[in-house]
Amino acid sequence: MTAGKNSLEVPLFGQSVVRLVTVPATSFTLDRPSRRLDRLQNAFPITGVCQNIPDGTPCVIEVTVKLDGAKTELRPRPDEANRQGVFVVGSDARRFKIEAPSEGGGRGPVVLDLFEDGLVGKGRLTVRIRPGIPHCNEGRDESIVIEFDNRLAVNIHPDLQGPPAAPMGTAVTFEPACTGAFLGLAIEVTVVEYEGDPDARGAVRDPFKPQGLKKLIAWDAGDRAAKTWRLGCTGGDAEVQFLYPEPEEILPYEFAWKASALLPDGGAVDVLPFAKLATGVGRPRLVRFDLSKDQEMSRSEAEAPVAGYRVTARLVFAGLAKDIRFSCALSLWRAVREGGKTKLERAEKGDAQFLYDTAEESAKVDLGLDSSGDGLFAVLHFPDLAMPIATVIDCGDLPFFDEDPGAGGSFSSALLGQRVCSEEAKALRPRGGAHK
């Protein structure tokens, strides 16, 4: 056995020798963090004091997150390259900082990402440093813990999930409530009309499938004022256009929403997944559409008085919120018998444009004075609608209608007709004609 300074040689069998070398004990202590984790990208300096740890010693930077109410910790990205770090020890051989690889090939402080490092919500982040030195700190973990609070919620009023089901056009208010990093990010709510079940993630029998309606409601960073949307509609607060029609809609209508954070680079990250907004919403109905004809004498001062009929259309819609208005157009038509056939001709009057106000019990629209009043019926269409009117309104058994500017008009079907006729046209519709 041979002994020297800080070493010991122990001979074994033959010429084998075991050499034991003593090294100074190594240890380090981390400073308490001074930064808040309330940004999209959070530079997170890790510093402290050490004993006998050489400059450049590699280490593993382990980050775990535990959200309030959770039973287990999360390890957001254990295999990322920036979880490898190095001790940068100062000239006094005591103070140190931990640096990690940064973009461009250099090194710098650890950067914690709001989304990639699991900092969404309220909880605690723990950082543990494991130096590449056996028995450092006598095998004890050295860690720092910092609390974070980065929450996004959206308050929705009123609750539309019923029963009873909300009528189309109901005013829905969305108001974001944010803390931490979300105070500095733009927020966007997306509303869709859907089939399936948004709560059954990955379900095979009833998968969630957004339909054509897609309404975006956005807030700039720092703006969290409440914003109102009319269910199934677009346009102003009260004067709306219908946004909900789907060519192959399976009734009733169902609406879902999600919330996303908009990133400075133009990307978006979903924070709150799709959830139900309103279910069981029925298609609005046209429950009355007919004409009245009152005999009247014209009072034009330029011409001799002419007897005729004042034609008035009356319309009643149901299944709509009681405080919206929407554009309608009415035209007056006449059935004329020619050579044993019936021809549908437009009266020599322009369309009567008006706003239907659901606050009123009905709408009465003056269609002018007609000399005879025979064979008259009215035709309704929505000026902004580019699909069959039956996708917007349940018209019951009223006849559907198509207009050809060069050849008059003709009865149509629910699958094609962009217009619907008043009650008087039912007697004129060919038997067996498509009308549902």
Image (cartoon, helix red, strand yellow):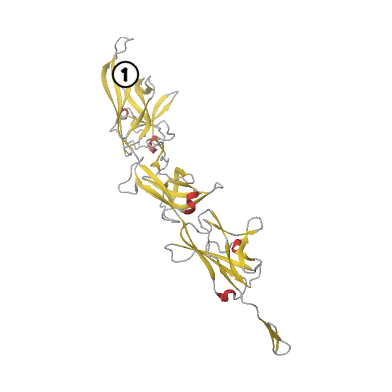
- Left-right relation of 204 to 423: right
Q: Which residue is mark 1?
A: 369
Q: Residue at x 45, y 53 (%)?
A: 179
Across and down, in percent, residue 334 comes to 34, 22
Can residue 392 be seen by looking at this rendering? yes
Whether residue 350 is situated above or below residue 124 in the rendered picture: above
* Count of numbered labels shown in the rendering: 1
Q: Residue at x 43, y 23 (%)?
A: 407
- Quadrant position of residue 241: top left
Across and down, in percent, residue 138 comes to 57, 76
Across and down, in percent, residue 103 comes to 63, 56
- Quadrant position of residue 355: top left
Whether residue 266 is situated above or below residue 432 in the rendered picture: below
Camera-nearest residue between 357 and 400:
357
Across and down, in percent, residue 14 comes to 73, 90
Q: Quadrant of the N terminus?
A: bottom right
